[in-house]
Image: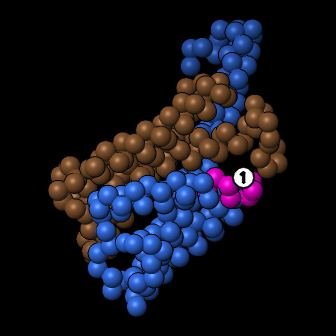
Amino acid sequence: MGIVYLAALLVALTGMVALDRRFRLFYGVNARRAGIVHIIGIVFFLVWDLYGIGQGLFFRGETSFMTGVLLGPELPLEELFFLTLLTYMTMNVFGASTQFFAARETRLAATTSAATAAGATSTDSSNVGDVS
Amino acid sequence: MTYLTLNILFLGLALWFMFWVRSLLKTKWNRAFWIPRGITLAVLMVFSIVFDNVMIGIGLVAYDTSKISGIYIGVAPIEDFFYTVAAVVFLPTLWALMASGARLKFRFGKK
């Protein structure tokens, strides 16, 4: 029984949890809301997978990297962890980019208002400063 | 049914949900909407391309080649990336819907 793939997924998931806790990205924002979004997301992708397997579109390949534990026909245990990782990472990156965007907007707004204030001051005083 | 047909159905469902929530919450299609989602999609696509190519490369998953489009990014069928796009469309929408709470009869989590 190979544990390589499952172990790799668990390492990646641990990283997601660490980043989430450190930067308050997903569960760190609202654990209850995150839990519900996460579970609905995983179920959505599991249903998608099951349809694909049911239609014979894709199937489990080489198993020496996998535990061999199946949740259903052609559906390895690892797929559940993969979907957990995919959804977690999506929301972590979304949390980070939302924070990044908000911080950037705040900074831009501050810069703009500072520039406007500075511009108004120089116009009020004299035109001497404009030469340099 | 081909893999592409299946994916169009599920991605379509996610897109429909996004438009439905948008009209419900009266979300504006502004920079605050697109920029975080755009960044998320770009980052997730890069990771997905690498991850999927490794997975298929070492043979963890296989496809019925008669049911895929035959368009690949490396060794990964283009269809696989619908999962990534759907995740970026669906999950932030669900998050936003729950965060709003206002127009629903019940509120999720703390404000």
Residue appearing at x 22%, y 62% in the figure: B64
Mark 1 — residue?
A33
Question: Could you classify mark 1 by the number of other residues whose Cα lies within 10 Å: few (under 14), some (14-19), or many (20 or more)?
Answer: some
Q: Which chain is brown?
A: B
Residue appearing at x 65%, y 45% in the figure: B95
Residue A124: x and y, percent?
75, 8
User: Does residue A9 appear left or right of residue A124 in this picture?
Assistant: left
Quarter holding residue A118: top right
A33 in magenta: yes
Q: Quadrant of the C terminus of chain A?
A: top right
Identify the hue of chain A. Answer: blue
Residue B103: x and y, percent?
75, 31
Residue appearing at x 61%, y 33% in the figure: B21
User: Does residue B10 appear left or right of residue A18 in this picture?
Assistant: left
Q: Residue furthest right?
A: B110
In front: A73, or A85? A73
In front: A36, or B52? A36
Predominant SS of the magenta segment: helix
A70 in magenta: no
Depicted B96 relative to depicted A90: above or below:
above
Residue A127: x and y, percent?
65, 8
Depicted A123 relative to depicted A26: above or below:
above
Considering the numbered disc 1 on the image, is that residue within a helix, a strand or a loop? helix
Depicted B44 relative to depicted A123: above or below:
below
Residue B46: x and y, percent?
38, 54
Give the magenta-colored segment's residue range: A28-38
Depicted A80 relative to depicted B66: above or below:
below
Q: Chain of mark 1?
A: A
Residue appearing at x 68%, y 34% in the figure: A106
Type of amino acid at the residue the image marks with label 1: Arg
Whether residue A58 is visible here, answered yes or no, is yes
